[in-house]
Amino acid sequence: MRITSALMALCLATPAMAAEGERIQVTGEIIDTWCYFSGVMGGPDAVVGTAHHTCALWCSAGGIPVGLLGDDGEVYMVLKIEGDDANAGGDTALNLASHEITADGMLYKRDGLNYLVVEKVVTDNGITNLNHEDYGVVPGFAIPKPKN
């Protein structure tokens, strides 16, 4: 009976603890979180800018959450973006894919992850990371090496 009471108290306390957030303003690039965290396309440098734009669009359209790779090196999982009533996976995310933005919103942290509810996109500089010259249309590491 004590365990049940303690569990109920914990469950009731969790929403209050989760509701605390911090207002921040962060600048960075809207990224595809699947490719960034999984490493499926190579390292973090390969999944940003123009070299990864088309894939970022496909992932976002498929429901993969977008993130904001801040200039501070932190990744912020975007839960909602201004102008998108449902969540961060709609047309708003597609229109911002690979763009460098400054976002104003509420930061929530849990289990080592940063979650961001973007209340206002303060600036949208478009795609500023033009890196096809570095990686080519298909990054070199994505081409299988010939067998000897």
Image: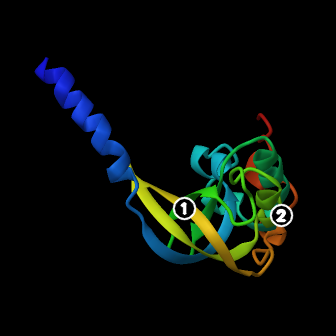
Q: Quadrant of residue 82?
A: bottom right
Q: Residue 39, labelled with which disc?
A: none
On-image quarter of the N terminus: top left
Residue 144 location (% of width, % of height): 78, 40
Instruction: Please give the name of the residue rendered at 78% of the width and 52% of the height, measured from the top-left corner.
Output: 90
Figure coloring: rainbow
Q: Would you place residue 142 above or below residue 52 in this image? A: above
Q: Nearer the viewer, residue 24 or 72?
A: 24
Please state if 21 lies on the left or on the right of 103 as rendered.
left
Q: SS for tag 2?
A: helix
Instruction: Please give the name of the residue rendered at 68% of the width and 60% of the height, measured from the top-left corner.
Output: 31
Q: Residues within 10 Å of mark 2 (few under 14, many from 20)?
A: few
User: Distance from label 1 to label 2 (Cα)?
Assistant: 18 Å
Q: Amino acid at mark 2?
A: Asn
Q: Quadrant of residue 123?
A: bottom right
Q: SS for tag 1?
A: strand
Q: Residue 112: in sight, yes or no?
A: no
Write down the residue under mark 1. Answer: 116
Residue 142 location (% of width, % of height): 77, 46
On-image quarter of the C terminus: top right
Q: Residue 136: in sight, yes or no?
A: yes
Please state if 46 lies on the left or on the right of 57 as rendered.
left
Q: Would you place residue 3 above or below residue 52 in this image? A: above
Write down the residue under mark 2. Answer: 95
Q: Amino acid at mark 1?
A: Leu
Instruction: Please give the name of the residue rendered at 70% of the width and 48% of the height, measured from the top-left corner.
Output: 41
